[in-house]
Image (spheres, rainbow, N blue to C red):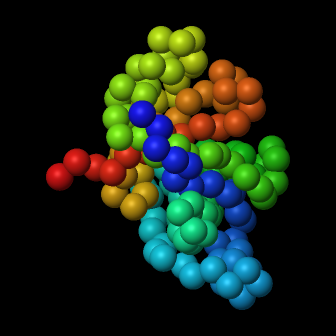
Amino acid sequence: MIQQIDHIGIAVKDLEEVKAYYEKSLGLKCEATEEVESQKVRTAFFHAGEVHIELLEPTDPESPIAKFLEKKGEGIHHIAFRTDNIEGQLQHAKDSGVKLIHEVPFEGAANKLVAFLHPKSTHGVLTEFCMEKPD
Ligand code: ZN
């Protein structure tokens, strides 16, 4: 079951510069920065109430975020829904006709399991499911 919006992913060119904007201009506190090797990105997380903001800076020209920036520039990249059953959520989406980018969840930032739905099936919004990794 989807529990809530977990975070909004925002593609940025310069993590430090944008981090400073969220800290100084919006007064949000950076919780953590982390490099996610599998996605070739550096991330910074902010709390905005119950929802997080995830800034994503590419670490490699082949990163999906680098390609996004090339095509669309900086801006909202994806919306992540927190679920208590990521496998079931993916299966449910697939059964309803949604194309998946990842059939199998992988380890994303903040020690979570994540998987993405294909934006061609989600009316233009790149959609992520995420779940706390079970111990
Ligand atoms: Zn995300």
Depicted 105 relative to depicted 12: above or below? above
Position of residue 97 measured from the top left corner of the image (x, y, whole percent) = 57, 11
Identify the residue at image location x=57%, y=18%.
Answer: 98
Residue 19: image x %, image y %? 65, 77
In-front residue for pair 112/73: 112
Which of the 4 quarters of the picture holds residue 7?
bottom right
Please determine whether, in this image, residue 5 is positioned above or below residue 32.
Answer: above
Q: Residue at x 72, y 88 (%)?
A: 24
The residue lying at 78 percent from left, 58 percent from top is 74
Q: Which residue shows up at 78% across the image and 49% down it?
A: 70
Please state if 132 lies on the left or on the right of 21 as rendered: left
Question: Which residue is the extreme one toward the bottom?
Answer: 24
Task: Give the residue furthest to the left.
Answer: 135
Q: Nearer the viewer, residue 104 or 133?
A: 133
Q: Is residue 22 visible?
A: yes
Residue 20: x and y in percent read: 69, 83
Residue 116 picture location, percent across and down: 52, 35
Q: Is residue 98 above or below residue 126?
A: above
Name the image quarter holding residue 51: bottom right
What quarter of the picture does the N terminus occupy?
Answer: top left
Between 123 and 74, the one lying in front of the other is 123
In the displayed image of the protein, which residue is found farthest to the right?
Answer: 72
- Mark yes or no: residue 60 visible: no
As drawn, is 4 to the left or to the right of 135?
right
Q: Is residue 112 above or below residue 102?
A: below
Q: What is the count of numbered marks? A: 0
